[in-house]
Image: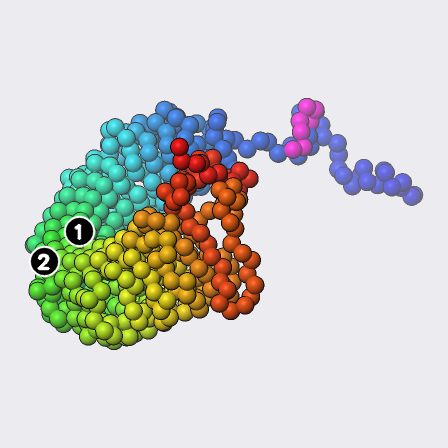
Amino acid sequence: MRLSLPLLLLLLSGPPPTSGMEDAAFPHLGESLQPPPRACPLRCFCPRADTVDCNGLDLQVFPDNITRAAQHLSLQNNQLQELPYNELSRLSSLRTLNLHNNLISSEGLPDEAFESLTQLQHIYVAHNKNNLISKVPRGALSRQTHLRELYLQHNQLTDSGLDATTFSKLQHLEYLDLSHNQLASVPAGLPRTLAVLHLGRNRIRWVEAARLRGARGLRYLLLQHNQLGATGLPAGALRPLRRLHTLHLYGNRLERVPPALPRRLRALVLPHNHMTALGARDLAGMPGLAELNLAYNRLVSARVHRRAFRPLRALRSLDLAGNQLTRVPGGLPGSLHTLRLQRNQLRTLEPELLAGLDQLRELSLAHNRLRIGDIGPGTWHELQALQVLDLSHNELSFVPPDLPEALEELHLQGNRISHVGAEAFLSTPRLRALFLRANRLHMTSIEPEAFLGLLHLSVVDTAGNPEQVLVRLPPAAPRQPRVLRAGLPELCRREAGTRAPPPHTGRPGRGRSVQLAHQAHRQRQPCRTHGHTPRSPCRWRQQQ
C-alpha cells in the first residue's frame, strides 16, 4: 500500500496534542514571534543588554527594573542618599558600579551593601555632597576579590573609618584613590597587587614603613598637599617599595630631600616645599632618576653642592624654577633634555656651567636679571641640540650673539631690546618662531636684512612695543609669517589706505615686507576684532 506524502508526514509527526496539552514553542493567538523588549529603568539609557546608564537624572530613589544581566551600572550625578541592599543583591553580575557625585553618607552605606557583588572590578563612590562618607563598614569589601579600581576621593574618611581589613582581601586591587579626605596616616592592610595609591590632600604627618610593607608592587605613590614635615618621611620609610616609579610630594613642609628613597625611582616631584639646601649625597641613591622637580622651594646657590646632581646620569628633566638661585648649578648631567631655571635671581651665565649639555633641547631662563654683559662668550657653544630658548623678562638690550644653530623657538619678550641688527640671527638658520613683544622697538628698529636666510620662520610677534614695527621677510620664505595679535589681513590694510606689500619678484635682495599693527600710528587705531570672522574682516577706525 502506498501512502501519500501528506499522510506520511502526519504519521511521522506523532499524535495530535490532546485537550489541555499545548506546544510551548508554538505561538498562540495574540503572541508575537519577536523577542520581548529589554527591561530598562524609566528615563535611563540601556545601549546594550549588560549596560544601564542612569547618569544625571536627579534620582532620589534607587531605580528598580534593572536587569539581572547588568554588568555596568552608572548612577553618577544623582541625589541618592542610600544603597538598598535588596536591590543591589540581585545584581550579582555587576562589574562596574558608578555612584560618583551623590548624597550617600556612611549611614546610607550598609555593612552588607556589596556582599553579593562578588564580580565587581570598578567601584566609584567619590565626590559625595552634603553628608559625606566618613567610614567604610567592616567587611563591606571583603568579598570583592575581583575588584581592580576603587575610587573614594572627596569624602570625609578618617583613620578610624578604615581598619586593617578594609582593603586586605582585595587580591586584585591595582588603583586606590583616597585623596581629598581627612586621613592622618597611610591606611593599613594594603594589598600587594596595588600599583597606584593616591593619598593627596589629606592630613598625613607621618609615613610608617610598616603600612607600606605589604604593598611591595606599588609603582605610583601620590602624597602631595599633606602635612609632611622634616620628620614626616623617616629614612627608609619607602625602601620596601622596590618597584616605585613615581613619587609626588609637592605642597608639603619638607626641608630636605627625604633620605633612602627607592633606588629604582624614575620621577621625584617635590615643588612647593621648604627646602633650602641640596647636599652632595642627597640624590646619590637614585641613579635611574629621569625627572626631578624642585621648583618653588627656597634653594640658594651657596647651599647647593657642586656635586649634588652629578650622580643622576639618567636625568632628562630638571625643574629648579621659582627658587633663589643666583647662578646655574654646577655638575649638571649631560643627559639633560630640559632645564627650567625661570623665576630665580640669575645674574650671570658662565660657559663652564653649561659645558657638556650637548643633549639639552629646552632651556628656560625667563624672569631673571640677566643682561647682555652677564652672558659670557661661548655660553651657547656647548648647547648644539638646543631647540627652545626662553630669555623673556630679563634685562637684555639686544639679541644675544652666537645662539645655537639648532634653535627653533626664541623667546625675548619683556626685555629692553631697542634694535635688531642685520647679523642677529646669522647663527640660527632653523628659527621658526621669534617673540619680541613688549620691548622698546620702533618702526625701523629691525634691520631689513635681519631675517635673511631664515627660511623656516613662521611666527614673528612684535606686539606691545612703543611703535608699529616693520618686519622684512626673506625672499625664499615658504609662507608668509603669522604675526601674533599684531598682523592685519590685507583687506584691513587696503581699507586704511595702506599700500599692500608688493608681490615677490624672486630677485635677491627684494624681500617682502609685512606691516604690523600699532595702537597709535599716523592717527589710526588697530581694527576692532569684536565679531570679526573670516567673512567679515575687521575695519580700521579713524581716531577722532
Query: Can you tell which quarter of the image residue 267 is in?
Result: bottom left
Q: Nearer the viewer, residue 327 or 232?
A: 327
Which residue matches tag 1?
Answer: 272
Query: Can you tell which quarter of the image residue 101 is in?
Result: top left
Query: Can you tell which quarter of the image residue 298 is in?
Result: bottom left
Amino acid tagged 2: Thr
x and y percentages locating residue 319 in the rendered image? 23, 60
**Element under label 1?**
loop
Q: Which residues are magenta?
A: 28-34
Q: Above or below — where is 405 with respect to 470?
A: below
**Element under label 2?**
loop
Determine if residue 77 is in view. Answer: yes
Q: Nearer the viewer, residue 160 or 450?
A: 450
Amino acid tagged 1: His
Q: Residue at x 16, y 70 (%)?
A: 330
Q: Is residue 63 left or right of residue 372?
A: right
In space, the residues marked 1 and 2 are separated at their CA atoms by: 12 Å
x and y percentages locating residue 372 in the rendered image? 22, 65
Which residue matches tag 2?
Answer: 276
x and y percentages locating residue 2 in the rendered image? 91, 43
Give the crowd class for mark 1: few <14, some 14-19, many >=20 residues within 10 Å: many
Q: Above or below — where is 62 with respect to 454?
A: above
Q: Residue at x 23, y 41 (%)?
A: 180
- Residue projecting furthest to the front: 522
